[in-house]
């Protein structure tokens, strides 16, 4: 059975503006009369949020395969308890990061076959209807993230070269799946980025934004 809802994911490097843009799109969708569930990964359920704490606050980060298995466990809980039920109820699910983050980050050190196996288990085959890849140079994203004055999580503390490779892997994923993953230039004022995102949602989903004033 095809779920009546939609599943839209936001991806990109650190500080790309995913949290900012997901809130903007949620406001637009709600103004157009849609029911929206806003969630994130790792996280979205109490168990997955606990796993998030383990992963992001690790003083000595676990091996990439351990990370991938923990992300998969968190994701299975999130998909089965939050995302699929919302989609079955006809809601629009907006998720800040999903399986493409595992490909971009853990893909550095885990072989593709093994990584895809963990992803298949974690997602139980769920693929987003639309993925918005917010792209900007990692220097700019990390500077934005640091402007917030927080110390940075285990992934933000990785070196710039690692973040450049994460960006390259995200862009390679977009080239591989051009119908699903759309690249958005995130190195612009937030309102310009939001307008591009609204246009992509209209162009690539059946979601009606009329009435939102968009
Ligand atoms: N991870 C995650 C994996 O390794 N594998 C996985 O499978 C998954 C799911 C998650 C970490 O976990 C890793 C990847 C990550 O390292 P997180 O907290 O979700 O950690 O980290 P981020 O997604 O990077 O969250 P950030 O909050 O750092 O970035 P956002 O959400 O992209 O950016 P946002 O919106 O918070 O904006 C950052 C700052 O920039 C400003 C905002 O006001 C804010 O201060 N800003 C702008 N400034 C100028 N111009 C714009 N257009 C701006 N848009 C926002």
Image: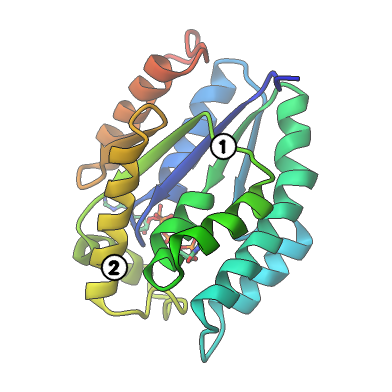
Q: Nearer the viewer, residue 120 or 37?
A: 120
Farthest-out residue, bottom:
60
Task: Specify the quarter for ligand 1.
Answer: bottom left
Q: Nearer the viewer, residue 79 or 46?
A: 79
Q: Is residue 75 above or below residue 20?
A: below
For the question of whether residue 97 can be seen, the reply is no
Who's the residue at 41% across and 16% down the image? 202
**What mark, if any, has residue 163 been given in the picture?**
2
Asked whether, in this view, residue 194 is left or right of residue 27, the answer is: left
Residue 40, horizontal then vertical, whole percent: 59, 51
Alpha-carbon span between mark 1 and mark 2 = 24 Å
Residue 24, horizontal then vertical, whole percent: 45, 35
Who's the residue at 78% across and 34% down the image? 85
Q: Mark 2 Cα within 10 Å, few/some/many (few <14, many 20+)?
A: many
Q: Is residue 163 above or below residue 34?
A: below
| Picture quarter with the C terminus | top left
Q: Earlier in the sequence, mark 1 or mark 2?
A: 1
Residue 196, horizontal then vertical, whole percent: 29, 28
The residue pinned by badge 1 equals 127
């Amino acid at each position: 059975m095809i779920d009546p809802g939609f599943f839209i994911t936001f991806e990109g490097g650190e500080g790309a503006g995913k949290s900012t843009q997901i809130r903007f799109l949620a406001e637009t969708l709600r103004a157009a009369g849609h029911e929206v569930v806003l969630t994130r990964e790792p996280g979205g359920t109490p168990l997955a949020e606990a796993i998030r704490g383990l992963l992001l606050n690790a003083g000595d980060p676990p091996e990439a395969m351990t990370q991938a298995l923990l992300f998969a466990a968190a994701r299975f809980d999130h998909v089965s308890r939050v995302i699929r039920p919302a989609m079955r109820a006809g809601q629009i699910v907006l998720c800040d990061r999903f399986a493409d983050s595992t490909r971009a980050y853990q893909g550095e050190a885990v072989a593709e076959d093994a990584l895809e196996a963990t992803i298949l288990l974690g997602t139980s085959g769920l693929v987003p209807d639309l993925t918005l890849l917010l792209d900007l140079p990692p220097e700019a994203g990390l500077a934005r993230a640091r402007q917030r004055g927080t110390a940075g999580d285990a992934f933000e503390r990785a070196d710039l070269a690692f973040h450049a490779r994460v960006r390259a892997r995200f862009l390679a994923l977009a080239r591989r799946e051009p119908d699903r993953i759309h690249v958005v230039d995130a190195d612009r004022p937030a309102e310009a980025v939001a307008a591009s995102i609204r246009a992509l949602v209209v162009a690539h989903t059946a979601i009606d934004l009329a009435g939102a004033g968009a």
